[in-house]
Amino acid sequence: MDENNTQETAGDALDETAAPSAIPTGPAAATGRAPIAVDPHVWVPEHGKSRMRTGRVVSNKMDKTVIVAVDRLVRHRLYKKIMRRTNKFVAHDELKCNEGDIVRILETRPISKTKRWRVVEILSRAPQL
């Protein structure tokens, strides 16, 4: 009987030290990730730097859609020269961006065939000519 009582008290002590949020439940328990508890359209994870980009609007000819050019610097593997690489992302735009604006885009759910990003803020406006 003493063994049973000590096991129960050990289990009770384990429950007291473990926080309820630290115990994964549901489908997230299988992957080891915490479930998303907020709207995925506005949620930015703590490690969300990889999901955000800053770039320049190069086209706004479509309705509520802009093309954002994001520059990055990479080093050539053999020659070690630093080169500029540009990627173009199609982003959903509710903020009415113009060409030349510097914007921050966030990865989101697929909105159309090529649109998987959305503009979250305009960092600077382009001068109007």
Image: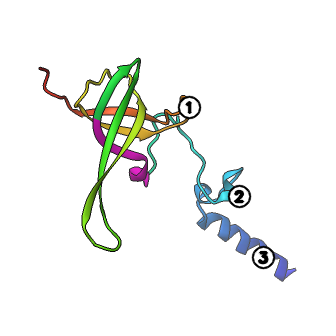
Residue beneath the point at 43% across and 55% down: 47
**Residue under the point 41% across and 20% down:** 64
Cβ atoms at labels 2 and 1 below 8 Å apart: no
Mark 2 and mark 3 lie on one chain; the one further toward the N terminus is 3
Count of marks placed on residues:
3
Q: Is residue 104 magenta?
A: no
Task: Please tell me which residue is depicted at 32% across the width and 27% down the height of the picture.
Answer: 59
Identify which amino acid the numbered label 3 is placed on: Gln
Closer to us: 102 or 100: 100
Disc ID at residue 95: none
Q: Residues within 10 Å of mark 2 (few under 14, many from 20)?
A: few
Quarter location, residue 109: top right
Mark 1: secondary structure: loop
Q: Is label 2 in a helix, a strand or a loop?
A: helix
Q: CA distance from mark 2 to mark 3?
A: 27 Å
Tell me which segment is drawn in magenta: 46-56
Q: Which residue is mark 3?
A: 7
Residue 30's label in the rendered image is 2
Q: Quadrant of the C terminus?
A: top left
* Distance in Å between CA atoms under marks 1 and 3: 57 Å
Quarter assignment of residue 125: top left
Sequence-first tag of 1 and 3: 3
- Image location of residue 97, percent across then percent down: 29, 24
The residue that disc 1 covers is 113
On screen, residue 90 versus residue 128, left or right, reads right
* Residue 36 pos. (x, y %): 57, 44
Pointer 2 and pointer 3: residues touching (CB < 8 Å)? no
Label 3 residue SS: helix
In this view, the mark in front (2 or 3)? 2
